[in-house]
Amino acid sequence: AQTVTQSQPEMSVQEAETVTLSCTYDTSESNYYLFWYKQPPSRQMILVIRQEAYKQQNATENRFSVNFQKAAKSFSLKISDSQLGDTAMYFCAFMKYNNNDMRFGAGTRLTVKP
Amino acid sequence: DTAVSQTPKYLVTQMGNDKSIKCEQNLGHDTMYWYKQDSKKFLKIMFSYNNKELIINETVPNRFSPKSPDKAHLNLHINSLELGDSAVYFCASSQDREQFFGPGTRLTVL
């Protein structure tokens, strides 16, 4: 079974600074997807970024980027120029290719301070 | 237009009652899911349906029964509600990759 570990239950960052959230996973698969989801206080789950394991290039979406290290099974999320609206729970998730079973980490609560 | 919708958003009920939560998606996706998020924010998959067929059925009490009348709808019926059922329940849908979530239903059992 696949497991996803987020070792930082809580983090904080000053507005406009950069923060990195950690995620590691365990799998014997070679093809899979990794995701970061954001859950603000409104509780809506929002997809932040997606990475296909076969792609070596790290995914980027505006201020959000990942550091995907396939050999180390690590998938960290970097948020640049943090904004107050980035305050949320962030969940790392793993899904095998051609399989709809998505597994989530326990989440990291990020607080952006003014 | 809302992509994945759930009703109701809030549900407060007494122990022992039976309740349903409805979910609809207008994305044309083949697969739909139900997740439970507990008070510690841990997200756990409960069920998954692909084209109206059950494909994932995690270990949940048989008081929980999903029903999929068509591939755009996946409803969750809960019998004999217990205090421990209090949580936020999320519906989601997907087409091979990322999942799109509904707004969640906060269920409180008194």
Image (cartoon, rainbow, N blue to C red):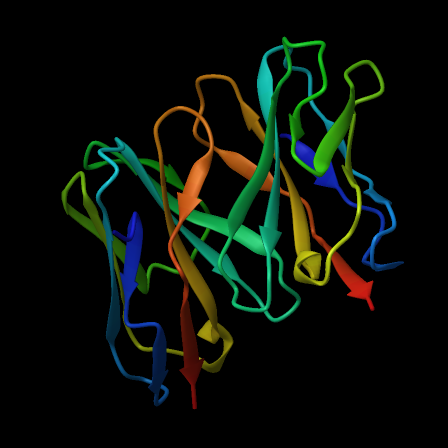
Quadrant of the image containing the N terminus of chain A:
top right
Tell me where residue A26 sits by quadrant. Answer: top right
Apparent side of residue B75 relative to residue A49 in the rendered image (left or right): left
Please tell me which residue is depicted at 60% across the width and 34% down the height of the picture. A49
Apparent side of residue B90 relative to residue A32 in the rendered image (left or right): left
- In depth, the one of A20 and A84 nearer the eye is A84
Apparent side of residue B37 relative to residue B85 in the rendered image (left or right): right
- In depth, the one of A27 and A7 nearer the eye is A7
Please tell me which residue is depicted at 83% across the width and 59% down the height of the picture. A15
- In depth, the one of B36 and A74 nearer the eye is A74
Apparent side of residue A104 relative to residue B17 in the rendered image (left or right): right
Q: In this view, does B45 lie above or below A95?
A: below
Q: Which residue in the rendered view is the most extreme toward the left?
A: B69
Q: Where is residue B27 in the image (x, y as percent from the top left)?
A: 26, 38
Please tell me which residue is depicted at 45% across the width and 23% down the height of the picture. A99
Tell me where residue A76 sits by quadrant. Answer: top right
Q: Is residue B49 above or below residue A54?
A: below
Quadrant of the image containing the C terminus of chain A:
bottom right
Please tell me which residue is depicted at 32% across the width and 65% down the height of the picture. B63
Q: Position of residue B28 (x, y in %)?
A: 22, 33
Q: Position of residue B82 (x, y in %)?
A: 42, 79
